[in-house]
Amino acid sequence: MGEIYSLNGKWQIGICSDEIYRGLDCKITDMKSLDESGILVTDGTVPGNYEIDLERNGYIRDPFFGKNLLMEQEREMNHLFYEKVFEFEPKENRTYLLEFDGIDTVAEIYLNGRFLAKVDNMLMTHSLPVHGKEFVKGDNEILVHIIPVAVEARKYDYPMLVYAQKYGADGLYIRKSAYMFGWDIFPRILSGGIWKDVRLLEKPEFKFLQSYLFTKFLADDWSKCTLECFYELEAGDLPYMDFAVEVEGKCGDSQFFATADVWSKSGRIKFDVEHPKLWWLRRSGEQNLYETEVRLVKNEVVYASKKFKTGIRTIDLERTSLTDKEGTGEFCFYVNHVKTFILGTNWVPLDSLPSRGKEKIEPALELVKDLDCNMIRCWGGGYYEDDEFYDRCDEAGILIWQDFMEACGRYPETPEFLEKIYKEAVFQVRRLRQHPCLAVWAGDNENDQSYIYETNGHVDPNVNRNTRGMIRRAVRENDYVRDYIPSSPYVDRKAYQSGTGETMLPEQHLWGPRDYYKGKFYSETTAHFASEIGYHGCPAPESVRKFISEEALWPYHENGEWLLHASSPTDKPDEPFAYRIELMASQIRVLFGCEAESLEEFSVLSQISQAEAVKYFIEKFRTEKWRRTGIIWWNILDGCPQFSDAVVDYYFNKKLAYDYIRNSQKRVALFCREPDDNGNVCLIGVNDCLTAKKMQYCIADVVTGRMVSESEVLLPANSAIEIGKISSDNRNAFFALDWTADGEKHHSHYVTWEAPFDKEKYIRCAKLAKVFPS
């Protein structure tokens, strides 16, 4: 690889409305024309989003505070001109690559005043070849003109079948993150900017255009595996004679080496490894990673190489089209041939302004590890995460369910759009497939539901040429060893023809009425696997005060600021997402039978409601293992200041649900099922480890102060079993659960009461059970 010149750092940004832009006398293509245009020019930063620079330089107030979000709509027609001068000494007769890892979104790129390219996808790298003669010795300049999405979107035709939620139609043709148009968990901030790294590098004469080392076969007893290395070369103008490709890897005392002569631009090397060190997901084993290098060699000279870490493992998804109330279907992951129970969280963009997301990856993943999740679902309304995210998940053993970036809509099927989505999918598959953490590809988020419910069943989602055509093709051509599901939830042809709707799919998003969390919608679900499920929880008052003005802190009803942060794009009470504040209040009424009288009480009662709900969801699925096979709750962390389902708010303040989830996700755990008609509570011991575990436990009722049960039990590997029954004392008990496994003490609780709860009694008992802050 040639020398790399980073173009990150200080840039200048010109900003003007579309009306002013259309009235300019000349086209802005360089620094001179930018200066002469008379528009606002200010200091900027790359990577960045321009609102960050406007706030830093005093032109706007914090977009996330109070009603300032409404002012974002005034900026939706802004043109942006990112300009940078850099010193460069080009080499004669060399070709360079000018690479933008992320431009948001539609942009014209100029070098020294000359047009290079127009791009229109913020979700992939743009690599532009530039001949050395197009540079000058000394100062060179790049100008990137970012065109408003609202302007660009008007160029397209919108047939009846094409559909988005109320605020998102402009995002259907243009590859910009869907959440930015306004979502129920994100405000509408269309934004713009060069949000990822920019660099200039020499185009190498020799390189690996692709290399992918994957596990082709793993013996049932793990004693042997077969690996295959696929590669594609850039080998200049030289003949292939005497060239060879070598692949070498090492992990502790395990190593492999294989080589093959080069006969074509692409090739494969297949070889066996005896007694490999396997990569296991979290909660199941060690994350063994092989330090690996693929080399292009000739006469002992290395012409190109690529280094990476990889894991030897297999991941398979067993899935049926449908299930029933008896649970005859299936949706289950097998890792290294072992049936695996999934405990995971949904992952959304870590900031509304995406350039700020990268710095939050590490602390966000620390939360995920602390809760001992073994899967993250990367939601399809956002963007593909930075390389660092997948590297850390490889190391931590956290599986990734990777959506492609389409969500809650019906996207165009024009040849131009299909080619665009195919190109993006190929880029991302090739970028991410080497990571052992990547478990499954999913074509979109909830688009199948959009086809069915928004058309009253008239349109079969299996005609969707994006997810059944182009994206499927991209995965099949570039990563056929991984499972691919076209949508989440996936309605295949058999499921569609059955007419049963989502309720009989093995994988479901369990949102429903969001009423009492133990109501029939949740307690009687047929789902084997819940890839979305959540419940509202108000942030702590100290967090709310950071984004709601003092005069709007209370009451919550008829409160425009609360609506904007709920996240409705306006402060009108009749918007589609405006219901979410009242939903949160309703959940308090359901659980406690009262209205909160202050922000402080609202926050406490809402957080209890959320904590008990998510606790119930997780424990229901775990106690019914293997009838249930996994739950991915919504969600770990907010990407903006808001009232939401996240269990950690935007400021990294943990809600009560965080601690309840941590207790509910212990690898060896003690749980209670709902009381039967006689008031007896069934005790369930769960062991997610691959070896048997001895558990000592004791249960006390803090209402009466008496010890209810105390015993020791041996839990089989990878199991959930009934270990006894206790009386719930006419549903008046609040049980404190304590258990020890592998020398570690654990703690949780179980409430037998029927709603509505006495709020003072709940808090008093929760403190006695040591599960509530004192």
Image (cartoon, helix red, strand yellow):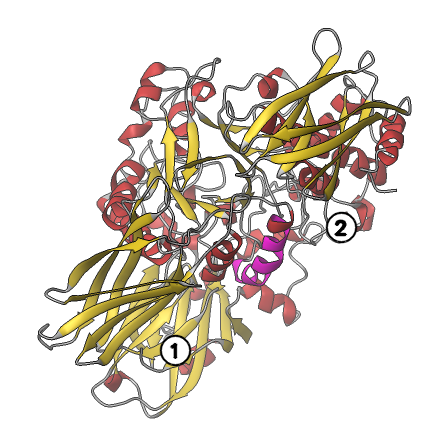
Label 1 environment density (alpha carbons within 10 Å; few <14, some 14–19, many ≥20): many
Quadrant in which residue 761 is drawn: top right
Using the image, tell me which numbered label, if any, was put on residue 543: 2
| Residue placed most toward the observer, 90 or 319 | 319
Asked whether 361 falls inside the magenta stretch, the response is: yes
Which secondary structure type mostly characterizes the magenta part of the structure?
Answer: helix
Label 2 environment density (alpha carbons within 10 Å; few <14, some 14–19, many ≥20): some
What residue would you read off at disc 1?
A: 142
Asked whether 285 falls inside the magenta stretch, the response is: no
Percent of width and height locating residue 524: 57, 16
The kind of residue tagged 2 is Ser
Q: Secondary structure at mark 2?
A: helix
What range is drawn magenta here? 354-368
18 shown above or below 604: below
Percent of width and height locating residue 115: 29, 73
Give the number of marks: 2
Quadrant in which residue 83 is drawn: bottom left
